[in-house]
Image: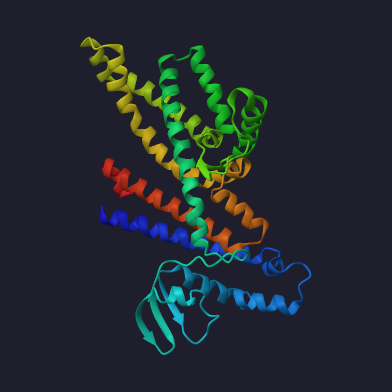
């Protein structure tokens, strides 16, 4: 088991290194000058050069990449003599590092990964992510719960009415849900439920988790704004889980232990719930764990359409303003989240099925 976990961790680290490399070089070859965006189009070249020097963008790309890795790694080298060599040099940060060893002017320190600062607001990227992630997490979890509840229910109903009109209707809706792009689905659902049917639904086309009170009493939590984004984000996993539940139920209902349970005189409800459904849920739950990881990444477009103040809005806003540290840091955070969830899922598979450990 230890060898299996070690191998998965190694694969995860290699994936993260590849993502870091790809993201860094991609955003360093994109057209556009962040310094000019910060100073305005009429800024003189001397001011632009000063900003680029302060951001470390005046150095060769290879050296910038090494410095970026040095910022991200928990074990990092701190150059005391070159303020521009190491971006973690802020005194308030450096004092909280654990100094391990010193060689000349270079110090080996143990620290938290540093995602640098926003070009526009000068806020640490980690603070921006910390403010946006809870709303993305809430949206993804609610969407997954919605997909699980509706998917299992529709899948069971379709299996019990195989080849009937209910089964065909569920099949059509599932196929439509799996083929519908999230961005288009978000626009369609917002238009239908928040514009055409607004008098009945009383839902907003745009809205955040927190709304401002009309009477000047500050902000309050408005869960109504969560309904449409969660419904939109949960459409694809809902369609997949519905078909998976149906197929698993049909397979379970054909097993010998189901016929034995019926022969013993157990009620139809008890046979379905306590015998067939319990065994059919294993692949559904494992599939749901994988979908939960992908929802964090897939929430970008949905959040942007509904103006849900999560990491999706942060990424789009950073792209519009050439705020590369924010975009890069957010993408890396999502990738780390995906890798961690996938590793935990693999470990869970190995615990449930020992055959997985030999792969």
Q: Quadrant of residue 292?
A: top left
Q: Quadrant of residue 6?
A: bottom left
Foreground of the two, 219 or 338: 219
Q: Residue furthest right?
A: 42
**What residue lies at 63% left-to-right and 33% top-to-bottom?**
190
- Number of numbered discs present? 0
Q: Is residue 262 above or below residue 226?
A: above
Residue drawn at x 52%, y 85% as measured from the top left: 82
Residue at 46% x, 77% y: name it.
91
Q: Is residue 76 left or right of residue 282?
A: right
Indicate whether 230 appears above or below 153. Answer: below
Give how far across and how far down residue 248 sits, in percent. 38, 26
Q: Is residue 233 above or below residue 314?
A: above
Q: Position of residue 131 (x, y in %)?
A: 50, 54
Please determine whether, in this image, residue 283 is positioned above or below residue 256: below
Asked if residue 86 can be seen in this view, the reply is yes
Q: Give how far across and how far down residue 258 sits, in percent.
A: 27, 18
Q: Nearer the viewer, residue 28 or 193?
A: 193
Do we see residue 353 in this rendering? no
Q: Position of residue 278 (x, y in %)?
A: 30, 26
Q: Is 245 left, or right, of 42 in this rendering?
A: left
* Scheme of colours in the image: rainbow
Residue at the image position 49 percent from the left and 61 percent from the top: 126
């Amino acid at each position: 088991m230890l060898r299996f976990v070690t191998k998965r961790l190694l694969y995860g680290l290699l994936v993260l290194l590849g993502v870091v490399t790809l993201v860094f070089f991609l955003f360093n070859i994109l057209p556009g000058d962040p310094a000019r965006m910060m100073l305005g189009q009429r800024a003189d070249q001397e001011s632009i050069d000063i900003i680029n020097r302060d951001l470390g963008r005046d150095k060769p790309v290879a050296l910038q990449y090494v410095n970026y890795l040095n910022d991200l790694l928990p074990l990092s080298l701190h150059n005391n003599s070159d303020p521009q060599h190491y971006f973690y040099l802020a005194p308030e940060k450096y004092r909280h590092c654990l100094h391990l060893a010193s060689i000349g002017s270079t110090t080996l320190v143990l620290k938290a990964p540093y995602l640098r600062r926003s070009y526009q607001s000068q806020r640490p990227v980690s603070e921006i992510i910390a403010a946006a992630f809870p709303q993305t997490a809430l949206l993804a979890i609610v969407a997954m719960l919605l997909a699980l509840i509706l998917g299992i229910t529709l899948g069971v109903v379709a299996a019990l009415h195989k080849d009937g009109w209910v089964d065909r209707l569920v099949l059509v809706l599932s196929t439509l849900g799996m083929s519908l792009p999230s961005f288009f689905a978000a626009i369609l659902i917002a238009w239908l439920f928040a514009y055409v049917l607004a008098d009945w639904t009383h839902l907003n086309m745009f809205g955040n988790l927190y709304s401002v009170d009309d009477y000047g009493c500050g902000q309050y939590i408005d869960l109504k704004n969560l309904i449409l984004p969660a419904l939109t984000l949960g459409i694809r996993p809902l369609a997949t889980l519905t078909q998976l539940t149906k197929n698993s139920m049909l397979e379970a209902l054909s097993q010998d232990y189901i016929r034995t349970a019926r022969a013993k005189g157990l009620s139809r409800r008890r046979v379905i719930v306590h015998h067939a459904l319990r065994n059919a849920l294993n692949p559904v739950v494992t599939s749901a764990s994988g979908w939960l990881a992908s929802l964090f990444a897939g929430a970008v477009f949905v959040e942007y359409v509904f103006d849900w103040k999560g990491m999706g809005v942060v990424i789009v806003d950073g792209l519009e303003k050439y705020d590369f540290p924010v975009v890069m840091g957010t993408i890396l955070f999502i990738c780390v989240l995906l890798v961690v969830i996938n590793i935990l899922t693999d470990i869970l598979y190995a615990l449930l099925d020992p055959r997985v450990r030999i792969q």
